[in-house]
Image (cartoon, rainbow, N blue to C red):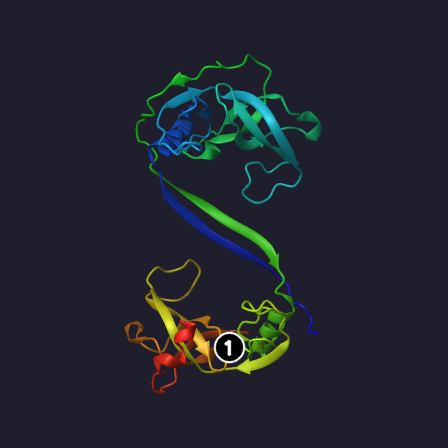
Amino acid sequence: MPDVLSAPLVVEFPFTRSLGPVQSAFLTGLRERTVLGVRADDGTVLVPPVEYDPVTANELGDLVEVAPTGTVTTWAWNPSPRRDQPLDTPFAWVLVRLDGAGTALLHVLDAPGPDAVRTGMRVRIRWAANRTGAITDIACFEPYEGEPGPSEPAPHTGEFTDPVTGIVAPARLDYVHTPGRAQSAYIKALEERRTVGERCPSCRKVYVPPRGACPTCGVATAEQVEVGPRGTVTTFCIVNIKAKNLDIEVPYVYAHIALDGADLALHGRIAGIPYDQVRMGLRVEPVWSEGARHVDHYRPTGEPDADYDTYKELV
């Protein structure tokens, strides 16, 4: 059995979204040190506010202002803050029901240690010095021993000068990927500029990249089969947006390629041909990266296009 590989991986992208009137008012309010909630059909004040009632699905818009003080309803201690978390010292994740609200808001509590945190403790918002209209305008919560805020929230129009209409939320996932026996063998074969799949002992289909089991029959696969290196474009898309840190000029073509002998199409970039001449049925071959263990792109072989009937099951 080959050694199983593992490597750290990062998936990261910016998520951009526009805001409706409720979310716009909530985030703009944070910029102005005002916490807004919305009243649901049953009278419950929801903080953070949502645009539709979670029970009736009716659109909501009855905004109210709640207090910046509240009560911890539950918590968990974080001894080792990670990159871009709200505090760089150990803190507690807390759910806080603000005075006047009927639901709890997730944020962080600045506390000296877990012994200083308890369910039912009173806290208040510590506002960020520089506020832009984001949940991070609440820098954190801190312990509070003063008077509670009003239990009945005050009506609010939700109107502010220069409202926030959109946000960019960065998403990032750091993890260690272990591809397993089948994919480890696949990756190691690529070092030798070979592409291998595995054949299902039941349906006899060859899957590339191999998964260790047949997705159709559900049985384990072990028989290795070398496929390609040539293949057929089954379908494709034209990419017009340049990816960050990717040194490829747009537009370019990304395609599903059925390698000869495989029963599953894999992904690959098509180059060596104008993007508007790429087509279904185009016969292609791999171009390997110098010193790397993967195919850089696929280029036309010059062969006649494959007949549609030969690859229609792989589209």
Task: Say whether residue 226 is left or right of residue 90.
Answer: left
User: In x, y percent, where is residue 225?
Assistant: 58, 81
Write the residue at 49% across / 15% down: 151
Residue shown at the point (67%, 29%) measured from the top left: 112
Q: Is residue 283 visible in the rendered structure shown here?
A: no
**Residue 219, quarter of picture:** bottom right
Looking at the image, the residue that sits furthest to the left is 276
State the SS at label 1.
loop
Q: Quadrant of residue 7?
A: bottom right
Q: Is residue 214 left or right of residue 26?
A: right
Check the image and report above or below for 52 versus 303: above
The x, y position of residue 189, in whole percent, is: 59, 77
Q: Amino acid at mark 1?
A: Glu
- Estimate how packed mark 1 is, as few (under 14), some (14 to 19) or many (20 or more) residues with alpha carbons within 10 Å: few
Height in image: 223 above or below 125?
Answer: below
Q: Residue at x 57, y 71 (%)?
A: 210
Q: Is residue 116 above or below residue 186?
A: above
Q: Tell whether 274 sits left or right of 204.
A: left
Closest to the observer, 3 or 163 = 3
Residue placed under numbered mark 1 in the picture: 290
